[in-house]
Every structure is written in structure tokens, then in C-alpha cells.
Amino acid sequence: MIPSSELLFHIRARYPELCKASDELNDTARSYIIPGHQGSFGFISSMSDHFCGSCNRLRLTADGQIKVCLFDAKEISLRDEIRRGADDDALLTTIGRAVLGKKEKHAGMEDIDVVTNRPMILIGG
Ligand code: SF4
């Protein structure tokens, strides 16, 4: 793995005028601009400089499971709740329970690949 700080170090060596662009609170990318050049570039450094503390993502999978984190295998079935006849308030309570179970951050690189978790291709949504 090459951490984003190392990439930034190399880019800054060539473009010392590099500066941080403004990001929105819940952006996953940390963006930069180089004055005198068009556009911007950013790093989504989920491993070397994670942004879990400001993550507001929730995912509803194609088969009706709510996931509060891509790297957390835990899923709560809204599909089953709906099939049991849950109303909107009950669904909101379930979603709230899922959010309260969201961890502070994902596991480190050494531990993350031993977690049995559905890959993106099976999550959909
Ligand atoms: S690892 Fe989970 S909590 Fe962290 S940014 Fe990704 S989805 Fe959000």
C-alpha cells in the first residue's frame, strides 16, 4: 500500500504551490488544486487516512438489507420487516437501531480481509 501522504509528498515536490481545496463535511475524497492549472484531484484514502468519523453513508442492498458500513458484515433486513407488515415508524426504528450499531471506524488493513463480508458486486443498490 502507498499511503496518500506519500503520494502527496511526491506531487508537492513537483508542484510546491499545491493547496488544499475545500471539501464538504461528508466528502470521502480530500481534494487539492494546483494554482495555474485547471481542475482538481483528490484522494479517497480509506485505509491510510480514513474518514469514518464523518461518514454519513447508509446502504440499502438490492435484496433489502441495510448496511451502515461497507466494511462491516452486519446487515439488518428491511425486506423481512416489510414482509411482516412493518409501518414507516417501525422501519425508522429499525434503521435507527442499525445506525446506532455503526462502529467508530473500520478495522485495520491486517484484519479487514479476514472479515466475511459481501463484496460490492453482491451488494448492489
Ligand atoms: S469504512 Fe464504513 S464508516 Fe468508514 S467511510 Fe467506509 S462506509 Fe463509512
Image (spheres, grey):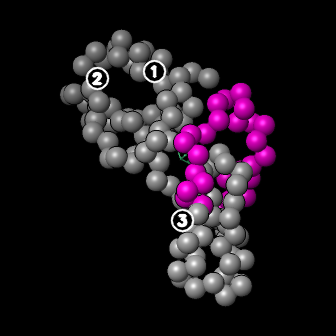
Residue located at (20% from left, 28% from top):
36
Q: Which residue is mark 3?
A: 96
Q: CA distance from mark 2 to mark 1?
A: 13 Å
Q: Nearer the viewer, mark 3 or mark 1?
A: 3
Give left or right: position of 113 versus 88: right
Question: x, y percentage for residue 66?
Answer: 63, 64
Q: Amino acid at mark 1?
A: Ser
The residue most toward the left is 36
Q: Which residue is mark 1?
A: 5
Question: x, y percentage for residue 79?
Answer: 69, 76
Q: Residue 19, relative to residue 84: is it above or below?
A: above
Q: CA distance from mark 3 to mark 1?
A: 35 Å
Q: Amino acid at mark 2?
A: Leu
Quadrant of the rendered image containing residue 28: top left
Q: Which residues are magenta?
A: 98-125
Question: x, y percentage for residue 74?
Answer: 70, 55
Residue 30 on the magenta segment = no
Q: Quadrant of the N terminus?
A: top right
Question: x, y percentage for residue 103?
Answer: 58, 46
Q: Give me the disc on residue 18.
A: 2
